[in-house]
Amino acid sequence: MKTSICTPSKSISVATLDIYSFQLLVTLVSALGVSFVLKDYVASAIAGLIFRKVKHIRPNTRIKVMVNPVIKGDVVDIGWFRTTLKEVGDGERLPSVHTGRILKLPNFFLFNNPLVIYGETITDEVVAYIEAKRFNPSCIELMRKAIEEEGHKVVEVGVFQKENYFIVHGIFESDISEMTDVRSKILLNFFKKVEEASKKAGS
């Protein structure tokens, strides 16, 4: 009859292995527990590293987060866990104007949502409505001059008619660092020129 002999060295090896296995299990459980509690912080830190590496999002970049409601702003700083933005109005609510509010968004929030990333310049538009009886073809050139005098590059100026008025439509490039409502400044300059042209024509 064969018998097996368990030597002390083998017993010690098995016991040591069991201790290591237990310690590894405890470590994994602890790590999973911490990750569950701090998962947002860990995700934000990883997202922040990706932003710094890829550099699609960086200071002085304008972004729009496609959530409801839309979040739009200029990046000021990318921290370990949060990205700081200067909020910019969107649509009809203070279009392209800094609202004065500072937003701090978790990095993982930006990483997990669709983003619109603007270039160093943005293309904007300005629209002027003029009564048909007051319209003159020179309004197209006046709009072009109004845009250029405000320091912006003209992309296109056009005109089309709708019912009993004409619409002068100007497309221009603007620097994202603009702190004021560019459209309003251009419109004021344009209508000033239209008024001056009307006075000259009537004199």
Image (spheres, rainbow, N blue to C red):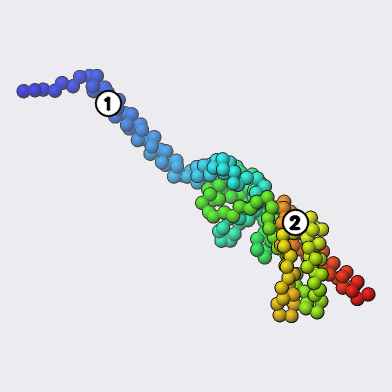
Q: Nearer the viewer, residue 67 or 166?
A: 166
Residue 18: image x %, image y %?
A: 29, 29
**Residue 98: image location, x then y, percent:** 70, 55
Label 1, secondary structure: give it. helix
Query: Is residue 181 in view?
Result: no
Amino acid under label 1?
Ala
Residue 78: tell me if it is visible. yes
Q: Nearer the viewer, residue 188 or 154?
A: 154
Q: Bin the neighbour count of mark 2 within 10 Å (Cα to Cα): few under 14, some 14-19, many 20 and up.
A: some
N-terminal-most mark, 2 or 1? 1
Q: Residue furthest right?
A: 203
Q: Amino acid at mark 2?
A: Lys
Q: Secondary structure at mark 2?
A: strand
Residue behind mark 2: 153
Task: Identify the residue at image location x=44%, y=45%.
Answer: 36
Residue 15's tag is 1
Quadrant of the image occupied by residue 91: bottom right
